[in-house]
Image (tube, coloured by chain):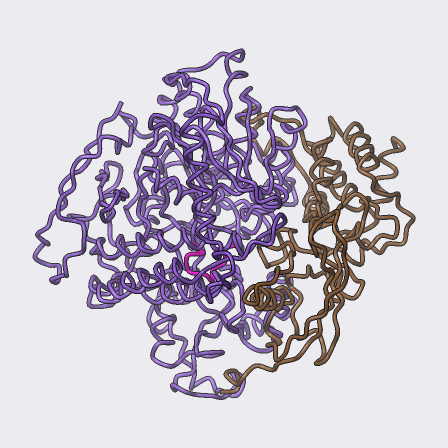
Chain colours: A purple, B brown
Amino acid sequence: MSTTFASGQPRGSGSPAAAPPAPSPPQLSSTPPVPRLDPRLPAGPLDSAWQRCREGLPLISPANKRKLRVLVVGSGLAGASAAATLAEQGYRVQLVTYHDSPRRAHSVAAQGGINAAKNYAGDGDSIDRLFRDTVKGGDFRAREAGCHRLAEISGAIIDQCVAQGVPFARDYGGTLANRSFGGALVSRTFYARGQTGQQLLYGAYQALMRQVAAGQVELLTRREMVELICVDGVARGVVCRHGLSGALETFTAHAVLLASGGYSNVFYLSTNAVKSNASAIWRAHLKGACFANPCFTQIHPTCIPAGDTWQSKLTLMSESLRNDGRVWLPAQPGDGRPAAAIPEAQRDYFLERQYPTYGNMVPRDVASRRARELCLEGRGVGPGGRGVYLDLAEAIRRDGREAIESRYGNLLEMYARITGEDPLTSPLRIYPAPHYTMGGLWVDYHLMSTIPGLFVLGEANFSEHGANRLGASALMQGLADGYFIAPATVTAWLAGHPQPEVGADHPACRAALAAAEARIAALRPEPGRSPGGRTATDLHRELGLLMIEVCGISRSAPELRRGLAAVEALRQEFGERVRVPDHGPGPDEALERALRLEDFLGLADLMLRDALAREESCGAHFREEFQTPEGEARRDDARFAHIAAWEQREGASPMRHSEPLAFTAMAPSQRNYR
Amino acid sequence: MSLQTVPATISLTLKVWRQAGPGQPGGFESHRLEQLSIDLSLLEALDELNDRLLRAGQRPISFEHDCREGICGSCGFLVNGQAHGPQAATSVCQLYLRRFRDGDTLVLEPWRARALPLVADLAVDRSAFDRIIAAGGYCSVNTGSAPEANTILIGRDQAASAFDAATCIGCAACVASCRNASASLFVAAKLAHLGQLPQGQPERAQRARAMANQMAAEGFGGCSNHLECEAACPKQISADWISWMRRELRGG
């Protein structure tokens, strides 16, 4: 049952006295109730809530499960684990992925590790502590019940992965090794060298392939979802475009699960894989699924800076480097000397100077913001002045070159390969880069979106990380959703809501197919006309530069407004000037890029609106108007202790709804790293 | 500023295999690229070329790619006859132009193996690898039935050795570099990953047989110990695992 459900609570239009006058953002005047925005939170004490909820969920007999089909979009940690588990339970599963193999999904690139409250280190960790760290890390913008459930499930994830043969790091006695990660006070992070995501993904992929062999899962590779199919308001399937033939196909099912990842590529350059995109969730959003907190995006401070125009992505350098690296810039703006020629006295170790307690280990957003500010003042190093030094020299003097090499071997090699510079003799150049998106489709406690029958898992949903994600928690959430939560809640949905069979000839399927066809046709040049002059890549690069400027590390109302106008102009330019010639059957990556960009343009608009409406600084969302005299984030719990959920409206601007957040286990506190 | 100087550039000629699809005629097509920043990867140079082709109304070059940081295993083609190009332990997405000299000609060709049929241009179909994994490359354990993780003790070195084998990214460079187009290194790596761990023991013998049979059924060749696979492997997986696999298959 729902206890804290209260949708459409009017948002205070009168600011508290302390807040500086802020320009009123668009579309906030009235917030009528959205009956579907019910989080369905469990009642009663938090610490047994998930277990009680699960035990109360209806079940389906094995004989009946065989008759039910589930469609999963995405083959990363969340999608592969959900598909495998649902198949093990007896459902007939179809899995859609645009990759040639499920093993390519971007989860594979996660480096750091996965958190679990096992307390193997005996350092006082517990489910309660991981829960509190998650709520606090999210800066009190996530649901307590969801965060608690995540902590509760975390241990079982490790058990499952170990049983599958995931080769986690071990101590000499043979037990699992743990390390502390992202500033946590306890060691709760399980890891497989710097390739934890790869190993966890292969565990889920192998479980999935076992079900493929058993005939329970049908792999639909090289297909990209281009439209959601709803029948009588219930999600019943998707339209996909085949990556080789270009054919549009419809797939129907009794429930649809989106596990299509995050949207950092709205910034064009990010640490995401080049093909990672928002189309699946954006298409669902346009069909009625509310989009929650789109402006909550995480920037990772330690990435290799951008260089040439044709650079296609940014590469993450694990944050662990900050344990041994000192961040600095030349004290003198415009100092053109190479790093080695700058004497100690003329270097500014700015994080150590500004944060004597935490120094180089301040949280991701703080480190990113300080680096950006100094680079904007003209003190940055490297191409375009967009970079700061991360210097290992002192650690090398202290621990020896060999120790540092063995600690960071792979990373340093990767850096040298990409930049052509040796990080053991000259400092690394780093700059913040978009890395993870906390926002995503709104889901209730059962991971169901505002479209009945549409479940959203992993980074694609907005859940649990609030306004900022803890290090090593993304993998945990993806697998919690896929292995444990969705299999229980999808079953409950199907048990309670029998759905009639729907075939590809259903009018809703035909309509969705026709819509996708029309959208693609509109991107083709008219016969005899040349391509429109702009390529999708070209326009995407421009969108990315804009978004990182106005909606990246630091945001302000005037800049966000400028962004809204500029995105509108880009959308028009896209419509008028991006045309992709049709070369017949065969791969057509140019069309794929154009389709994805069209969706990113819509999402960019929504992100800007959300960032403008959230007149506070919290987590990774920093509004320049809302900071303390010391330049730290100032949250506004009176007005913004809620989840923003956006709804698209035909012929009108998107509407912002809110789901209030209640904190019973701990009182919201303000962080202080000075 | 020393680091803000205009980056060095080079000019390259790319001789690229062009073939619109499996049944279509194929051949090399030459493209001259001028003044490329040496800080670009080879794939980024192809992006630039594709943009040019697209603007000219021509069909862009198909090549597989995604993460562009050497871990997803999507990318891979021959550069001057070498799988993933001349740099050891490097997938082609991590191959930067500073590896080459101004004026170089690079011949780019797809993996060529019967079991990896051509998709288009530089892209091939590697779904055979998925079918080999489906044949037995897993531990049969349903979600929810796992024992507490630390009840399974695994020595540190043993876990590290299993990890080394498990880092295979499934790119198929081993097949492309093998004169027999054998997938032995790929199969051996998965067998060694699971076969070295206690979790993999119950199905160990059956897994080895099933995966080896599937490899043969897909049309991959046998191993004749040339060890080109090890040299081409971007993850430096040791060909010793192939000998280890043979012992597994003999029931040793």
* Residue A561: x %, y % from top left: 24, 63
Residue B247 within the magenta-colored segment of the rendering: no
Q: In the figure, B123 relative to A165: above or below?
A: below
In the picture, which quadrant includes the N terminus of chain A?
A: top left
Span highlighted in magenta in the image:
A264-272
Which quarter of the figure has residue A44? top left
* Residue at point 43%, 88% (across, down): A335
Which quarter of the figure has residue A666? top left
Instruction: Find the residue positioned furthest to the front.
Output: A528
User: Is B90 on the left-hand or right-hand side of A108?
Assistant: right
User: Is A168 on the left-hand or right-hand side of A663?
Assistant: right
- Quick one: A300 or B132, which is closer to the camera? B132
* Residue A314: x %, y % from top left: 51, 63
* Residue A663: x %, y % from top left: 24, 39
Q: In the figure, A216 relative to A268: above or below?
A: above
In the picture, which quadrant includes the C terminus of chain A?
A: bottom left
- Quick one: A320 or B36, which is closer to the camera? B36
